[in-house]
Amino acid sequence: MADLQKLVEELSSLTVMEAAELKTLLEEAWGVEAAAPMAMGAMPMMAMGAAAVEAEPEEEQTEFDVVLKEFGPKKIEVIKVVRSLTNLGLKEAKDLVEGVPSNVMEAVGKDAANDAKSKLESVGAVVEVK
C-alpha cells in the first residue's frame, strides 16, 4: 500500500496546471468525470435542483370540471343557473342539484369553469373547480 502521507505531500506540491493534467489523466484511466467539490450544506439544494431539472415539466391543466358541492339556501336559484349553464331541462337540472356532489360541467376551459363557479356562488352554492 502506498504511503498516504508521502502522496499528500507530492500532491500538495503540484502546480495548478499539473493538477489539471492529473485530473484529466485520472478521468481517462478510471473512466469517470470529476465534479467540482461542494459544501455539505449545498448538497441537498443541489440534489433538489437536479431532481427538478430531471423531472419532466408538468403540463398545465387545460380542461376543468365544475363540481357542485352544496346548493345552499336558494335551491331554485341554483337550479336556474344550472339550467342556463348546461341547457338541461327543469327535471334534469333539479336532479343534478339535489344529487350533490355532482358535476355541473365537465372538460371545459378555465374561463368557462371560473365563470360557472362565480355564477353558482353568487346564488349561494358551494362549488369546486377541479
Image (cartoon, rainbow, N blue to C red):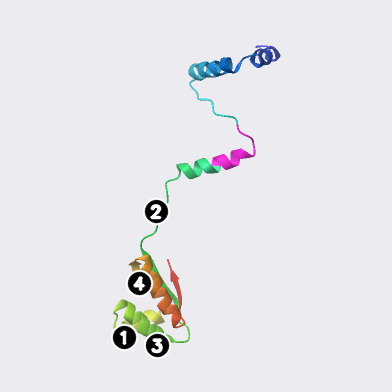
SS of the residue at dot 2?
loop
Q: Amino acid at mark 4?
A: Met
Residue type highlighted by circle 3 = Ile
Q: Which residue is mark 4?
A: 105
Question: Where residue 100 appears, x then y in whole percent?
Answer: 42, 77
For image coordinates 40% across by 70% down, the residue present is 114
Image quadrant where one finds the N terminus: top right
Q: How many marks?
A: 4
Q: Is residue 106 visible?
A: yes
Horizontally, residue 63 falls left or right of residue 37, namely left
In the rendering, at what x and y percent does residue 40 appear? Answer: 64, 36
Quarter of the image holding residue 65?
bottom left
Hey, which residue is sitting farthest right in the picture? Answer: 5
Residue 84, placed above or below residue 8: below
> Is 84 left, or right, of 57 in this rendering?
left
The stretch in magenta equals 38-47
User: What is the C-alpha distance between the residues marked 4 and 3?
Assistant: 18 Å
Q: Position of residue 55 (x, y in %)?
A: 45, 45
Of labels 1 and 2, earlier in sequence is 2
- Secondary structure state at the residue bearing disc 1: helix
First of labels 1, 4 by sequence position: 1
Classify the position of the C terminus by image quarter. Answer: bottom left
Neighbour tally class for label 3: few under 14, some 14-19, many 20 plus, Cα within 10 Å: some
Q: Which residue is mark 1?
A: 90
